[in-house]
Image (cartoon, grey):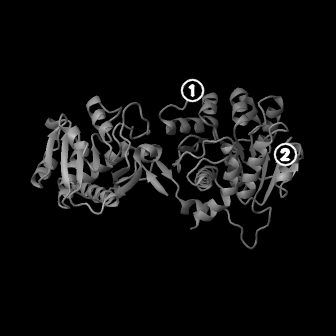
Amino acid sequence: MQGIWTTERIRAAEDRLLAVTPDGELMRRAAFGLATHTAALLAGRTSGVSGRRAVLLVGSGNNGGDALWAGAFLRRRNVAVTAVLLKPERAHGAGLAALRRSGGRVVSAEDGPQWIDRADVVVDGIVGISARGPLRPDAAALVERASAPIVAVDLPSGVDPDTGAVDGPAVRAALTVTFGALKPVHALAPDACGEVVLVDIGLRPELGEPDLVRLDSPDVAAAWPVPGPGDDKYSQGVVGIAAGSATYPGAAVLAAGSAVRATSGLVRYAGHAADVVRSRWPEIVATGSVRDAGRVQAWAVGPGIGTGQEGRDVLRHVLGQGVPVCADADATTIIARSPEVLDARDPGTPLVLTPHAGEFSRLMGEAPGADRVAAARDAARRYDAVVLLKGHCTVVAAPDGRVAVNTPRGSWLATAGSGDVLTGLLGALLAAGLDPWLAAASAAHVHALAGSLAAGGVPTSASALVTAIPDALRALRS
């Protein structure tokens, strides 16, 4: 499990570590790591690093200092280094002196373009974690000119470090080298950060518990239920699926099939698409009504049930069964329009809401905004539910404040029916007895992994996503 800390927490931890560390030592540790990974990137693009050309875009403050010191270390590898100073009067003094001693070149922003045009790599040391807002015009023009891969120092300049939001010109890095700890931007803005590597500078003991987490495959593999010799179909979890309609059976087929592929012990389907579901998945026990479904250990409800009176009755019924419920799609719209349906829910019964941005706006009366973590936390507290906020990066928030972020492997999940597949996965995990927050975060992880495997680098479909779930589960343990 990867911990992620807000910039406020990281700055405070850095201050504590700086107080007991010789002056300049932390910066040199960070810069050496930055230089090492930059050299590795150069070596991967060429036959070696000697004679390659690196251009440093140097702003004021410590990120500029990191870049300058890294340039001095690169000079030891015989890399030709040119520092473009955006604010010469505020450049980091010790770093600048080190670069000059090493034989590095220092030029003004006006002279920067000619060096950027010939660069093999560009190092973004423009701003650090204290900065907010887009790049200023002079910096944006230099970044726009770069055709070589960009290595971001700590984070891509112009991207908000705590929300990952981009509101104007910003760096789009091939590689981000960060120091001490991961920041929210590294999980929430993967397209801007590129590959992220973490350099240890001794900060971890000063940080305390993380503000966010990101599950990795071993975490999800450990959480995912695996049948043992004493298990049967009931002990593995019985999940009920209330989805789809006679006119639109696809949601039912996808959600129910996903639950089957997630290795539920037994899947019960209830709804107007029973015949279609039964024909596609003969192992499913299918009935026409939730009242006839039989006993389940969790319900997944919502995709394609409609938002009229019948849909409200279905949702009210499953909420009143005293078992965990995953409410998706039409179910979230019903809750937003008719919040009284939640009166059927016994206090403390687990509920997971899985809105996309539009459904979130209906539930909360406003869009998630730039700070999607704060928005998901607010919704979790309001509804006393785990909230899985869909998007390019999925945010999973619990009422107690825990937050997990799932960083995607591409954008392959932006396809019709993808959310129905996630609903089935999540329902299966709830039926198996997982903590709802862990169930939601694990389902999101496997959903994204299955999407990547199904796509194989080209657009795919939700049906292929269902087929890829077993491969994703196997990949967790590889």
Query: Between disc 1 and disc 2, whose residue precedes?
Result: 2
| Residue 323 in view here | no
* Residue count near mark 2 (Cα–Cα under 10 Å), binned few <14, some 14–19, many ≥20: many
Q: Which residue is mark 2?
A: 270
Kindly identify the amino acid type of the residue bearing the numbered disc 2: Ala
Q: At x 41% / y 49%, what residue is drawn?
A: 194
In the drawing, does residue 447 fall left or right of residue 406? right
Residue 25 or residue 412, whichever sits in front: 412
Kindly identify the amino acid type of the residue bearing the numbered disc 1: Glu
In the drawing, does residue 374 fall left or right of residue 137? right
Q: At x 20% / y 52%, what residue is drawn?
A: 71
Residue 192, label in figure: none
Q: Which residue is mark 1?
A: 366
Q: Can you tell which quarter of the image residue 137 is in?
A: top left
Give x and y (percent) for residue 185.
Answer: 42, 44
Residue at far left of view = 101
Give x and y (percent) for residue 379.
Answer: 59, 35
In the drawing, does residue 233 fall left or right of residue 365? right
Residue 237 or residue 478, whichever sits in front: 478
Q: At x 27% / y 40%, what residue is drawn?
A: 126
Q: At x 72% / y 58%, what residue is drawn?
A: 261
Q: Mark 2 falls on what kind of element?
A: strand
